[in-house]
Image (cartoon, helix red, strand yellow):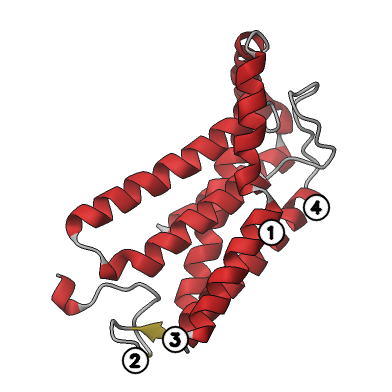
């Protein structure tokens, strides 16, 4: 999965650089359809403006820093480092991508953002947070709990990505790029750290949240 996400992100980025017009042909019909239907619903726009900010950079940084401090206070240095790295690398990475790649956002969206659009920062933040929570809690959950966790994570990411599309803050390709980027970052951080097994003992071959043998 991480390698596939990296490959897809690389292909998407290459397409935006080599032939942005072709990508626009895919993006534009979706965004224009949303514009026509959503501009009739000002109440929905007002609600989504609030919801979308749940994945803004400040809340993301606050939640990540809080998790890192909590794990550090419990002397769980691996998970603390995992949270800290994901919290720092995610916004730095997507901000760098937006700075390097000229990718104008939809014109006259329902919110005003002047920066370039690829990858979507809000979507990257939401996907990174969701993936991090899944990795950190997976081994401590029963099968039913894992199912609910995955469903909740997916709904959260899709919901935030949807707000960016409906508000015309991003094109469809931008939010897809955000999910791919977050998958690459979180996976890379998890694989780069010393791994842990349930019980808190560090080992060199088990990632944060890795399922132990007793979990099946």
For residue 91, the mark is 1
| Image point (52%, 85%), residue name | 73
- Mark 1 falls on what kind of element? helix
| Image point (41%, 49%), residue name | 153
Mark 2 to mark 1: distance in Å?
30 Å
Mark 2 to mark 4: distance in Å?
41 Å
Depth check, mark 2 against mark 4: the one in front is 2
Does residue 171 appear anywhere in the picture?
Answer: no
Mark 3 to mark 4: distance in Å?
32 Å
| Crowdedness near tag 2: few (<14), some (14–19) or many (≥20) residues, C-alpha within 10 Å | few
Q: Looking at the rendering, in which quadrant would you find the N terminus?
A: bottom left
- Mark 3 falls on what kind of element? loop
Relative image position of residue 95 (x, y in whole percent): 75, 55
- Mark 4 falls on what kind of element? helix
Query: Does label 3 or label 1 sit earlier along the sequence?
Result: 1
For residue 201, the mark is 2
- Mark 2 falls on what kind of element? loop
Query: Does label 1 or label 4 sit earlier along the sequence?
Result: 1
Mark 3 to mark 1: distance in Å?
23 Å
Mark 2 to mark 3: distance in Å?
10 Å
The residue that mark 4 highlights is 100
Which image quarter: residue 22?
top right
Q: Could you say which is closer to the camera, residue 213 or residue 97?
A: 213
Q: Could you say which is closer to the camera, residue 79 or residue 100?
A: 79
In the image, residue 24 sits, relative to residue 126, either above or below, namely above
For residue 194, the mark is 3
Relative image position of residue 9 (x, y in whole percent): 57, 50
| Crowdedness near tag 3: few (<14), some (14–19) or many (≥20) residues, C-alpha within 10 Å | some
Relative image position of residue 4 (x, y in whole percent): 44, 54
Query: Does label 3 or label 4 sit earlier along the sequence?
Result: 4
């Amino acid at each position: 999965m991480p390698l596939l996400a990296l490959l897809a992100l690389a292909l998407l980025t290459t397409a935006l650089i080599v032939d942005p017009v072709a990508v626009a042909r895919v993006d534009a019909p979706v965004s224009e359809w949303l514009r026509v239907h959503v501009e009739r619903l000002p109440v929905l726009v007002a609600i989504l403006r609030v919801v979308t900010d749940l994945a803004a950079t400040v809340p993301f940084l606050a939640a990540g820093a809080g998790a890192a401090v909590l794990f550090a206070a419990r002397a769980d240095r691996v998970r603390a480092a995992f949270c800290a790295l994901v919290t720092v690398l995610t916004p730095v990475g997507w901000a760098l991508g937006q700075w390097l790649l000229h990718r104008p956002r939809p014109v006259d969206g329902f919110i005003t953002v002047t920066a370039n659009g690829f990858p979507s920062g809000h979507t990257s933040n939401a996907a990174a947070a969701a993936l991090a929570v899944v990795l950190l809690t997976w081994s401590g959950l029963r099968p039913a709990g894992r199912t609910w966790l995955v469903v909740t994570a997916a709904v959260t990411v899709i919901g935030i990505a949807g707000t960016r599309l409906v508000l015309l803050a991003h094109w469809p390709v931008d939010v897809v790029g955000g999910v791919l980027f977050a998958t690459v970052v979180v996976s890379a951080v998890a694989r780069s750290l010393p791994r842990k097994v349930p019980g808190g003992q560090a080992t060199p071959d088990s990632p944060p949240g890795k399922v132990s043998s007793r979990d099946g």
